[in-house]
Image (cartoon, rainbow, N blue to C red):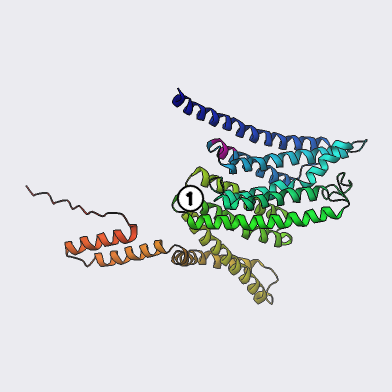
């Protein structure tokens, strides 16, 4: 009887986890939409850029978190994503209600002030929790070993300490400057808590990164591919966020928001692909294409901007219009695309994908010798050597079909 109850109990737990996960996801989106409705009722307009950014992030974290938690209930990463989505939805509702209460004749009231105070610090759980514990627990949702528990405790204390210090910071609220923080405390203890929380958080972040690096060095096969997905998303974020911040004045708010969205959404999407193992082994192709087209884009953009500047200076004596310079630069970039892509692809393969590069060279050399080889025995031996070198199989057998007798 107990043997029958085991699978039934497991299926029941799986079904319960699925209902809970999708319930939290639906609740997060409901809170988000409610926040927009309440904010609009208070007369505050919806800003397309920031609000679309928050809505997209909440949706992606909700869906990816629910997929992971429903299929792998024991993996903490899915529940962390769901918690981040829930915190964002609650923050949107709190912010919307605070704006609504500020428009009333009686003022915000105690509930409105509390909502404004929470909205002011709601960035802490969303910004700090997912990346810190994603690095520490990825990909199976467990610590590398018990020795890493102090890192988890340090990260947790740092996040809680930062949240508490921000919540008790006296003075006007950053998001609602017309309101003073109702929970502000004038005390050096708050500054001490903030400093201690920042130190603990830094230790937690560095320890989490070290844990992931060590996990990657020890991993092989499937887990190694999983970590590559997260590393790719982290690399994209590390490049995109600084560029978006530095180029805010150059590219404008819309481009900056899109770049920030891509960098933030890369982490849950990459984690979801890795944990759910959907097209897991395509990561090497993705990394290859990212390196090639990233370098190609940077090079062609530099050529384009440089040629436009040089041609405008050269043609300034003839015409003040920039049309000829832009047209000539566009033609130059179009002509450079194919040869530049081929050259960069060869450099990337040779530097980062040596096995693929060596295999291609081996096949090219074998094809050249194949045209001149007439000894069937030597050809068989050479073909077997090429297969062993490029594919590295456990065993190689060559079967030749005997020619049919003529009738």
Residue 69 is covered by the magenta coloring: yes
Q: Which quadrant of the figure has residue 319? A: bottom right
Residue behind mark 1:
223
Coordinates of residue 268 in the picture (x, y in percent): 59, 47
In terms of secondary structure, what is the magenta stretch mainly? helix
Coordinates of residue 275 in the picture (x, y in percent): 52, 45
**Range covered by the magenta-colored residues:** 66-70
Residue lying farthest right? 106
Towards the viewer: 319 or 154: 154
Residue 57 is covered by the magenta coloring: no
Coordinates of residue 128 in the picture (x, y in percent): 68, 50
Towards the viewer: 123 or 316: 123
Q: Is residue 313 left or right of residue 192?
A: left
Q: Is residue 300 visible?
A: yes
Q: Is residue 318 left or right of residue 73?
A: right
| SS under mark 1 | helix
Residue lying farthest top? 1
Circle 1 packing at 10 Å, graded few (<14), some (14-19), many (20+), is some
């Amino acid at each position: 009887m107990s043997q029958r109850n085991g699978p039934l109990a497991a299926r029941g737990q799986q079904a319960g986890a699925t209902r809970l996960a999708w319930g939290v996801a639906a609740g997060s989106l409901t809170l988000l939409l409610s926040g927009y409705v309440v904010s609009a009722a208070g007369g505050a307009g919806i800003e397309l850029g920031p609000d679309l950014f928050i809505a997209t992030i909440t949706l992606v974290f909700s869906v990816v978190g629910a997929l992971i938690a429903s299929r792998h209930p024991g993996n903490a990463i899915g529940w962390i994503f769901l918690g981040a989505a829930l915190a964002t939805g609650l923050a949107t509702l709190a912010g919307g209600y605070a704006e609504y209460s500020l428009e009333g004749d009686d003022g915000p009231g105690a509930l409105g002030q509390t909502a404004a105070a929470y909205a002011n610090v709601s960035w802490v759980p969303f910004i700090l929790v997912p990346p810190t514990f994603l690095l520490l627990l990825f990909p199976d949702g467990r610590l590398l070993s018990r020795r890493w528990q102090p890192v988890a405790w340090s990260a947790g204390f740092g996040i809680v300490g930062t949240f508490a210090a921000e919540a008790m910071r006296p003075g006007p609220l950053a998001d609602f400057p017309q309101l003073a923080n109702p929970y502000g405390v004038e005390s050096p203890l708050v500054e001490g808590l903030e400093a201690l929380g920042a130190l603990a958080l830094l230790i937690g972040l560095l320890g989490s990164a070290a844990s992931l690096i060590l996990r990657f060095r020890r991993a092989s096969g499937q887990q190694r591919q999983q970590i590559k997905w997260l590393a790719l998303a982290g690399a994209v974020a590390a490049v995109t966020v600084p560029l978006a911040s530095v180029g805010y004045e150059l590219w404008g708010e819309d481009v900056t928001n899109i770049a920030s969205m891509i960098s933030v959404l890369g982490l849950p999407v990459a984690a979801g692909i890795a944990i759910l193992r959907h097209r897991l082994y395509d990561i090497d192709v993705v990394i290859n294409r990212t390196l090639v087209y990233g370098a190609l884009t940077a090079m062609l953009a530099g050529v384009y901007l440089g040629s436009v500047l040089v041609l405008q200076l050269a043609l300034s004596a003839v015409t003040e219009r920039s049309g000829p310079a832009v047209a000539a630069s566009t033609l130059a970039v179009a002509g450079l695309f194919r040869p530049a892509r081929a050259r960069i692809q060869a450099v990337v393969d040779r530097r980062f994908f040596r096995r693929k590069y060596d295999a291609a060279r081996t096949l090219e050399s074998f094809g050249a010798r194949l045209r001149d080889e007439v000894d069937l025995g030597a050809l068989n031996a050479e073909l077997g050597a090429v297969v062993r070198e490029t594919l590295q199989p456990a065993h190689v057998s060559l079967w030749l079909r005997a020619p049919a007798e003529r009738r």
